[in-house]
Image: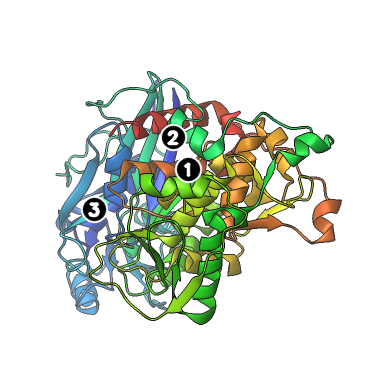
Amino acid sequence: MSECKIIFTGPVGAGKTSAIRTISDIEPISTDELATDMTRNKKPGTTVALDYGLIKLQADERIHLYGTPGQERFDFMWEILTQGGIGLILLISNQRPDPFQDMHFFIEAFKSFLHENNLVIGVTQMDLNDHPSIADYHLQLESSGYKIPVFEVDARNRRDVGLLVEALLFTLDPGLDE
Amino acid sequence: MTASPLKPKRLAAIGMDQRQRNALRVLFASQCQNRFVLVEEESSEICILDLDVFGGERLWQEFRQRHSQRPLILVSLKPRTIDNELTLFVQKPIPVARLIDAIEQQVLRLDPNSSVLTECPPAPDTPVETDPCIVPDTQPTVGKPAAVTRRVANLMSETQERAFVGTAPDIDPQDPRQLARVYYNPDHYLQGHIQQALNLAVRYHKNVSVEGPWPAMDLMIDSRTLLIDANERQIRPFCTVPDTTLEVPLRVHDHHHPDSGRQGYPVTAFLWQLALWASRGRLPAGTSLTQPIYLRHWPNFTRLQVTPHALAIAALWAKQPRSLIDTARGLQIPQRYVFAFYSAAKALQLAGETRRAVDTLIAPAAVRRSARRGVLIRLLDHLRGHRKTP
């Protein structure tokens, strides 16, 4: 059986659960419960251990979609989740107080994974707050040596999330359309 | 004779909520072959205590009063020096290996002869915390269809593709007659006038009216939108037919049109589309076919018309500048797709010809082929098939 894994990460409320739901072929397993701590005001339900979705390609071929827990204290979970992953999709909410800080935090947290794998970024909730702009994100990333896809996304929109995953695939192999 | 499997070590998590406990369960199951199991404090052999929880210090003191000899692992964001041989400290963020190492050290402390490398564990004789939320690795499928037939140029309909990319065959760059057919002048189209208006608006930070035979257009600098008294279908004829004689006055102003009721288009997406309509698979006049092309950064594709192969071209140029001809050759695609993408990216000042000598000295690398190309292609097809679904 051929298995691949794509990891969705980002801060609480960035849309990881929604993004997985949007492209999963199964009803995603969202291990949500009512938030009881610091995340209470961010999102009515906050991911417990992880989110899980699945894309079935052929009878014996699956793409596993994992969403990291939203709390930074579960960082050791991230390390487990990324093992065998083909790439990382980082969702950043423009509604958060400091989206750049979030972005740098997650890039740093997954630094070792990103040495060997690729990253794409989806910026969510730009309809509610259009600053920083996508160009601003690129400027920030450029200073860190990254030239990667950064798209405005609605995590509930299949085209948006699909394009983000497509971009990840083309960064892995630009010749996929041959 | 088979070795008798050892019982899993019983760990308790103190000061941790359900989420943290679930994370530990996943860790034990996925990384530790279930050699450890999460139980309540009373029946535990080793405890992990989160000092960062409210009242964490007090929890620690109370724990030691209850269990003076029980091995403990403290975790906290703040570094600590622990003066107690039964207590280990792991600083957050917690690396998997560090936490497992700490647990194994405590297991050895409990029983110096024990080995943590046990066989598959039996069911524990202590009630184990269970949680229905632990995620299985596979689930039955519901609803959606399986993979669909591969289609390369399926991001837009054939009609759209003709409108945006045209149907021109590849040219021989050595043939001057063929070469002449591949260029267009953006200034002879609405594209050029909107580009000038945008430059003017940015330079003076003012709104700009673009006056001409088309419906009224105003570029609003603060919102970066173009207000137009028409829909896309009404505008298109002005975007595809060149006019070499037209004088287009651009009027800078501070007026706002909050109640105009006009359609508002994001100016970058509009300009991108104008460039595709005008270009139809051609290039802005004067573009070199052999000079390497750089991509300043990826276009915001989710808010733009995505022409066939555009993501592949962007991925290639993001890695290394490469000439237009070499891009088509490397990706094995018709030149018009490369030319159309370049024209649109150039209109947004995202792409251009490199001026550095080093870029022409270094031959572009071959297109990297992933060892997983097969599965990546099938995933791509799957995503594109689904995108056609409303």
> How far from the left and from the top, in percent, is residue B165?
55, 37
Callout 2 amino acid = Met
Residue at x 31% of width, y 52% of height: A154
Mark 1 and mark 2: Cα distance apart in space = 7 Å
The N terminus of chain A lies in quadrant: top left
Name the chain letter of the residue that bears numbered label 3. A
> How far from the left and from the top, in percent, is residue B96?
43, 54
The answer, for residue B10, to whether it is visible in the render is no
* Circles 1 and 2 in contact, beta carbons < 8 Å: yes
Is B288 positioned to the left or the right of B301 in the image? Answer: right
Residue at x 32% of width, y 38% of height: A23
Q: Residues within 10 Å of mark 3 (few under 14, many from 20)?
A: many
Is A82 positioned to the left or the right of A48 in the image? Answer: right
Residue B54's place in the image compared with A22, above or below, is: below
Q: SS at mark 3?
A: strand
Residue B136's place in the image compared with A56, above or below, is: below
Disc 2 designates what residue? B156
Is B333 positioned to the left or the right of B89 in the image? Answer: right
Q: Which mark is residue B306?
A: 1
Mark 3 and mark 2: Cα distance apart in space = 39 Å
Callout 1 amino acid = Val
Mark 1 and mark 3: Cα distance apart in space = 37 Å
Q: SS at mark 2?
A: loop
Comparing B86 with A166, the one in front is A166
Q: Quadrant of residue B341?
A: top right
Is B369 positioned to the left or the right of B48 in the image? Answer: right
